[in-house]
Structure formats: structure tokens, C-alpha cells
Amino acid sequence: MPESTSGPSAVTRRRRAVLSAWAGFAVDSYSIYIASSVLLPALVYFQGDMSAETKSIFAGMTLAATLLGRPLGGLIFGHFADRIGRRRIGAVTIYGFGTISLLIACLPGAELIGAIPATTLLLVLRFVEGIFLGGEYTAATPMALEYAPPHRRGLIGALIQCAASGGPLLVAVAMALTLLVAPSGGLDSPYVQWGWRLPFVLGFVLSFLVAWFLRRRVDESEIQKQAVAEAGEQVESPVRMILRGRPGRAFIQAWVTMTGLFFIVTVTTSVLNQFLLQNEGYTPADLANTQLVIPVCMASYIFFGWLSDHIGRKPALYIGGALQLTLYPVVITLVGSGSVRGWWNLTLLAVAAHCLTVAPFGVLPAYINERFATIVRSTGWGVAYGTAVIIPSFFSYYMIWLSALVPFVHTAGILAAFGAILILVATMCGPETRGIDLRRAGEDAHRVDVTPPVGVIPAPSLTPAKEQG
């Protein structure tokens, strides 16, 4: 029998699941961005008198180490989330990256153990943290969507994804407060010696609060309980299952879609800021003020998630991909051309770029999770999401190669257009899934029934249900 969604107890369980997924993803995002902001002024603590080139390399590696750990986390924890339950694995992963955050806060510096050991310990811990971070969204998002009513699944997926914008804001606030009590200014400054540790301790506290809430207040979804019971002692790995047959086709489509999206994401998160700072009169302080305005793009997540619940996942993705293909290259090229003047004008372009970037993100949590059967849902979602970032992460090399053919200012727009084309083509190759019963997810496209409008009773099916292959 389908899980009841009537009555306050069902609503409460659903809200708790969504809240825990949102909070977990927010702390996840906080832990990612903390390396590129909080650690940056304190790298001298770990690296001592290393050359400027070496320091620059290690600064990038602190973020890269975490990103490289995420796909491995999706593989490892996705398997266990599908086999023993999403709630327990979600709590384990949050406890895990919270503990790593505390260990980073306790690290000794170059003066005590030397630059190479200190930096190596930092990178190893960031890599392990990435593994746990990869496991968090692998477990939490599918669980929340299994609780969601079919006609609101797109909106709820978008609301969870909004947490990605909450992390950087929380990092900015934590760093600003830390600098008030521990000013930065050289190796002996309070910030370098101990102040940078405080945001990591905060990450530890936040992680344990979220994990406690998840363990104590959130139940496993009935859909997952039923799937685990029906699977019994099945020994086949979910990773193997998503690489062949119908799940394999779903995985390829999801992976190509996410790869296309991450091409645009990398341009927005990296190239856009560089282009902004190249404009005459635009200072780092202006960039910081622009970053405070960027979270308005959360409206784009929510709108496209809501839209996909009303017109379908594929039409919403077509609209988002078409806007990215036609408008995003124009916006990013205008910013990089230097022809736009004034903070307000540049900030409006930056906000437009971010809104265009995240539009498909409002649809994809629901769409990708609807493409996989329950017994492989966490693995399919986590591995597709985690591994899709690998190829786009080399965007700087692609821009250099393209600059041999076109002016450099156009290279970012070309990469973004390529990403949008991948999204559109991958969307064409998959079925519509709006309104699907997640117990039947993974069936052929013609088996998907769209949720009828509220108050309309669907006609009974005259076709016997076919067993899912």
C-alpha cells in the first residue's frame, strides 16, 4: 500500500526529512567553501616560507582534494544507503565530515612539524572530508524526495538544492565574525595562529546538531523500507546495477546532463569572478558586495522546480537549457569584455549569470531520482552527481585551447553553450517522469503516469501492470 500522506504525523515526518536534507546540504556547502575563503589567509601557517608559486598550487589543492573525494563518497555510501537505509548513512556521513572538520581545526602548523607534513595532513583530511560529503547528499536527498508527494517533488527537490547558496553565506558570516576577534596580518597575527580554527569548530558543531536531528527525529521512508525488505539478501552491487541495462541508460543520461550543467557551474564560480575584477573600477570589495546579492538566485531554483511540477520535468529542462544556450554566453561575454561600467550593471549581469546557471538545478534532484529504482536510487544519484564534475573541472585548459581559435573573452561562453547543448540532448534521450510513483521508478517512459490535477480522480488502468525489469 502507498505510504499515507494524510494527517499531521505524515506531514511532520515529511517536513523533518526535507529539513534534515536541507540542513545537511547547507553544512555540506559550508564545508566545501570554507577552504577557498577561511583557509586562504592562513595558508602561511601550513606552508611557512614556501615560494609564491607553491603556495598558489596548494591553495587550489585544498579545494580540489575535497572535490576529488566526493565521487568516491557517492560510490561507497550510495551502496550502503541503498542496502541498509538512507537515514543511518546520512547520519554517519554528517558525523564523519563534522569530525574531520574538528581534526582540521586541531592541525599543527609548519613551525611545529614542517611545511610538507603540515600541508599533507591538511590535504589528506580534506580528501577524507570530501568522501563523507559525497555520501551526505547521496543519502539525504533521495530520502527527502521519497517522502515528498508526487505533485510537489520538483519543488521540494529545488528547496533542498537552495541550501547550496546557504553555505557560502554562512562561511562569509563566520569569517567576518572571526576577523572581528582575531585580526589577520602576517604569520604572527591572531587569525593565522588560531582564528582560522573557529569556523572549522563551528562546522563541527553544526554537523553534529544536524546529525543528531536526523538520527532522533527522522524516520526511514516507507518506500525504502519496502525496497530493502523485498531485496532481501540480494548480493549484487548497486554500482554494477546502474552500469547496465535500463539503470545503465538512466545513469548515462543523468551523468551527461549533470556534466553539461557543471560546465556552466565551473564557468560561473570561477571565470565570472575573474572577469568582474578585470573591469575598470571594480574592486575586491565590490566583488564581496556582489556576492551578498547573489543568493537572490535561489528564486531560480524554486521557480524551475515548481514549473517542473506543473508542465513536466523535460519541458522545464528544455526551457532552462535553451535560456542557458542563448543568453548565458551573451551575459558572460559582456562581463568579460570590459564594455559594461558601474557596480549595479555588473552585479545585475552577475545575478543573471547565476540565475541562468542554477535553473536546471531546480529540476534535476527530482528528475534524476525519479529515473532510478529505489534499490539503486542513492547510488545512481550520488555517482552521477559526484563524477559529473570531473571533466568540467579542467575548464581552464579548455579555455586555453579554445583561445587559439577565438578571442579569449569568448571561450567561457563557448564552454557554457557546450554544457547547455549536453543538457538539451540528454533531456531528449530520457522519459518524462513527473508524477511517477517512486515504487515504479525505472520503468519505460510510456509507463509513467502524470499526476492529475488536484480534485480529479484518475480513470482506472485497463492494462495489467507489467513487472519492472
Image: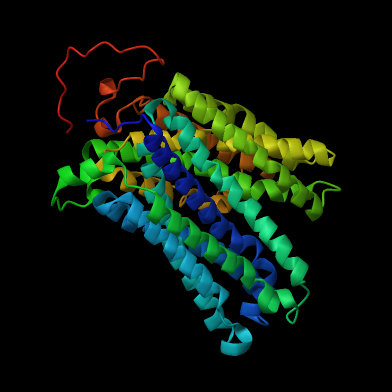
Residue at 75 percent across and 70 percent down: it is: 181
Tell me if 156 is positioned left or right of 34 in this view. Answer: left
Tell me how many marks there are.
0
Nearest the camera: 238 or 11?
Answer: 11
Regarding residue 440, the answer to whether it shows in the image is yes
Q: Residue at x 66, y 82 (%)?
A: 48
Who's the residue at 28% across and 40% down the image?
222
Residue lying furthest front in this view? 8
Q: Looking at the picture, how far across and down is residue 450, in whole percent?
A: 35, 19
Q: Which x, y percent locates residue 100?
A: 48, 69
| Residue 47 rendering spot, x and y as whole percentages | 63, 79
Q: Position of residue 179 (x, y in %)?
A: 74, 67
Viewport quadrant of the C terminus: top left
Q: Nearer the viewer, residue 248 or 408?
A: 248
Residue 246 figure quarter:
top left
* Up-down relation of residue 278 to residue 312 (above or below): below
- Choose top left, top right, bottom left or bottom right for residue 434: top left
Q: State which quadrant residue 436 falls in.
A: top left
In the picture, which quadrant includes the N terminus? Answer: top left
Q: Is residue 180 above or below residue 1?
A: below
Q: Is residue 69 visible?
A: no
365, 325: nearer the viewer: 365
- Describe the colour scheme in one phrase: rainbow
